[in-house]
Image: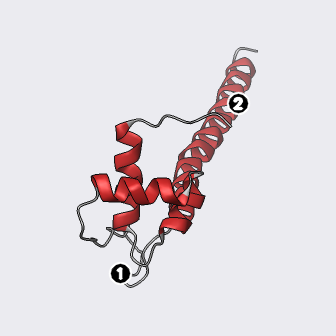
Amino acid sequence: MARKNYTDEFRRQAVDLYESTPGATCRGIADDLGIARGTLADWVKTFGTGSTTAPINPPGMPSGRPETPAKKVARLEAENARPRAEKAQIETEKSILRRAAKYLVGETNR
């Protein structure tokens, strides 16, 4: 099996994720990121601050329940999908109004 090389930025982000998630385990975070538990544990020893801080919860999220990475991704994807759907609806409405305007202009020219 080939040895993977990770950037220092990725390593620091993995450690930040571990430290900012209350109740997180090295095994759980490592599984989510697709890395070995021991690898993450070594990174925590190297890059870790030694203290954990509570993550900032998004608006509308109860402060007692931190957001898991999977839930955060799902929430952000839903937030991104809303403007796209609204844009598609607006484009459809605009197209209908254009056709109606052309039809009405044609009616008055007769």
In the image, what residue occupies the spot 55% across and 67% down?
28
Q: Which of 108 and 62 is in front in this view?
A: 62
Q: Which of 52 and 107 is in front in this view?
A: 52
Asked whether residue 74 appears in the rendered view, the answer is no
In the image, what residue occupies the spot 74% across and 22% down?
107
**Neighbourhood count class around disc 2 (C-alpha, 10 Å): few under 14, some 14–19, many 20 upward:** few
Q: Give the mark nearest the N terminus, 2 or 1.
A: 1
**In the rendered structure, which amino acid carries the disc numbered 1?**
Ser
**In the rendered structure, which amino acid carries the disc numbered 2?**
Ala
Q: What element carries label 1?
A: loop
| Snapshot quadrant of residue 9 | top left
- Please, which residue is most extreme toward the bottom here? 64
Q: Residue 100 carries which label?
A: 2
In which quadrant will I find the N terminus?
top right
In percent of width and height, residue 100 lies at: 70, 30
Q: Is residue 57 above or below residue 32?
A: below
In the image, what residue occupies the spot 24% across and 70% down?
51
94 to the left or right of 19: right
Color theme of the render: secondary structure
Q: Distance between the residues labelled 2 and 1?
A: 51 Å
Q: What element carries label 2?
A: helix
64 to the left or right of 78: left
Residue on which the image places disc 1: 63
